[in-house]
Image (tube, coloured by chain):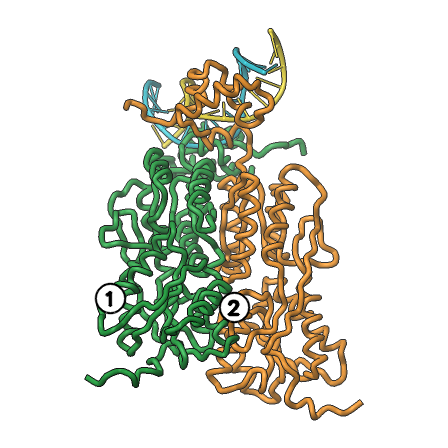
Chain colours: A orange, B green, C yellow, D cyan
Amino acid sequence: MTKISAPTLEDVARLAGVSTASISRALNDPDKVAKPTRDKIEAAIEALGYTPNFGGRALASNRTNTVGAVVPTMANAMFASGLQAFQEVLSEAGVNLLLATTGYDSEQELRQIKALMAHGADGLMLIGDARPQSTRDFLEKRRIPHVISWCFQPDASPIHVGFDNRAACYAATQHVLELGHRRIAMICGVRQGNDRAADRFDGVSAAIDDFGQGAAMVRAVDAQYRLEFGGDAFEKIMSQSPRPTAIICGNDVLAAGALKRARELGIDVPGDVSLVGFDDIGLASVVTPALATVRVPQIEMGREAARLLLARLSGEEGGGPVELHTEFMPRASLAPPAQAVDQPEP
Amino acid sequence: MTKISAPTLEDVARLAGVSTASISRALNDPDKVAKPTRDKIEAAIEALGYTPNFGGRALASNRTNTVGAVVPTMANAMFASGLQAFQEVLSEAGVNLLLATTGYDSEQELRQIKALMAHGADGLMLIGDARPQSTRDFLEKRRIPHVISWCFQPDASPIHVGFDNRAACYAATQHVLELGHRRIAMICGVRQGNDRAADRFDGVSAAIDDFGQGAAMVRAVDAQYRLEFGGDAFEKIMSQSPRPTAIICGNDVLAAGALKRARELGIDVPGDVSLVGFDDIGLASVVTPALATVRVPQIEMGREAARLLLARLSGEEGGGPVELHTEFMPRASLAPPAQAVDQPEP
DNA sequence: TTGAAAGCGCTAACAG
DNA sequence: CTGTTAGCGCTTTCAA
């Protein structure tokens, strides 16, 4: 046992009686090597337990087969399941995932983007469109291949994979209005630096304005995406008059927090107030009453983001943008308002 | 604009009028370079927008400052939040996270371990103790620095960071027994290849046996950790007699699935049957009735795992094992059995 | 404190 | 189809 370091290509070459180049070929492009040679090589590799050295390979080929994802948080099931799918597709292509989180902080995002690039990421997956010019500049100057996910605008560029947050909320709000709700409130994600949260607010707001018939957004509160804050926002909204008959929430976590607080306060959902979420994470269908929400194709989005990024890394120009579609999920937390009787008959 | 590729150390050296060696030093061990030299170097780096090339660095230094984590799934909030914490600690140390998932499949685990190592991971974080000899051999022969998390046995080795699944379940079951339950069932995770699931079963089983007084495990069903399967197992258990008065579940996901199905079947929790979960993910306190469960210090575990791994990578031998503690969380889904009146008075 | 120079292990022209 | 050979960009002795 005098062997100290891992076997190198040269060791394999010596044992197999071929050149290092042939081995490199056998590894990266097997068709270019004759069968008998390949067999010898494989035997030698096996015998030595050879594994290619990562640094050498990265240096010579200038790629790492690693891509990075920078997401706000893994704590939200939304991102966790999207990432899971993202990673699975990458894995099938022999590409690995470097993961970093920002906590919804754009400075942190830039820091993590730099860190992932410094660690050799060939490309990046980013969430959302809102980021400071400094970050955009960095991405552009360094010509970093990347895709942007979880959002989609009508004017989306070819690197977008996502859904239209505004349109999804517009449609959800229409459902709420059509049930007879007129006084609507919103518990919104923090819009500052978060285009998805802002788009969702805009969608709700526009739907209400367009609907007319006395419908109004009676109150909107920004809250960080956490259960407690959803509850706090709910309490604040319900403590003022006029009370809304429906509250639309920026995501399911906020809605679940609101629901929990409603129970604690003895406010009946949907009897006293209806609640609507967004994302359709597992939580939404497990709580009581089940949360009406907007289903977002998280898995598909993760997969498509991976496919698009892989395509771009292999030089393909097309393939994007990819628009995915959401679906409103009516569930027990949404019902006609008790005061529907107040409404004038047509 | 004739510049085609990124600036290299040599470019910086030329501009700063020093050798490449000095720059390397200035980057990796600033104290070894005189202040004026360092200033020149920094100016040159700034001017060129230089970033060290990852491959070159990895090749020359034989490390990547990247560690890998191989976990069953990100879809369970348990792992997602642990990973989040793990990543945050790494990030502070300038280390990045390569993430892979196994879907609770041990062959897949070995494949991913190999993939992460091939992608240059300096070390690994793995979940649980149960793995085939082939995987153990690989870890050992390649002398891969790693930590094992999410489990802890009395004879834990210095690379373990976790909690004692068996003891935690033993204690939880005692609470259930002390409330008067005698007919207990378990919806257990798939034990095959999963030491945590097996340990949890053992803990429940042992607590019942040790308690005596006619207590018995009337039924145990293995189920994959998904809501539907928890529901299916619940239905199966409740369709046979004698019905248990309490069901202990392998994790909160199974318990939430059982709870949901109970509601659909018109079975009252805890009136007809009590339910206990495990992990205390956010879900547990949001459902109705709130789930009695075992709190697992997910964040702390992720952090400690990162610290231990970093320590081992920098050559420290101590620091482990780290045992973390769980806490039983009594909540509304657990109540004395309705049939408690049947019991003989002392 | 600094510089010169020898690799680290692999890939990719280019020849043969 | 295979071998030769020049780097890829950085770290790290070893001398000065």
Secondary element type, mark 1: helix
Disc 1 chain ID = B
Q: CA distance from mark 1 to mark 2?
A: 35 Å
Q: How many marks?
A: 2
Mark closer to the observer (1, 2): 1
On residue B209, which mark appears? 1
Disc 2 chain ID = A
Secondary element type, mark 2: helix
On residue B231, which mark appears? none
User: Measured from the top left, where is residue B39 in percent x and y?
Assistant: 45, 39
On residue A283, which mark appears? 2
Residue reaching furthest to the left? B346
User: Which residue is painted at 44% across and 34% down in the image?
Assistant: B58
Pointers 1 and 2 within a single chain: no
Indicate the quadrant where residue A273 lies. Answer: bottom right
In this rendering, is residue B331 above or below A67?
A: below
Identify which residue, A340 or B41, lies in the foreground.
A340
User: Measured from the top left, where is residue A168 in percent x and y?
Assistant: 68, 66
- Residue B66 appearing in the image: no
User: Measured from the top left, where is residue B284 in percent x and y?
Assistant: 43, 70
What amino acid is labelled 1 in the image? Asp
Residue reaching furthest to the front? B241
Q: In the visual, does A307 lie left or right of A48?
A: right
In this rendering, is residue B116 above or below A34?
A: below
What amino acid is labelled 2 in the image? Leu
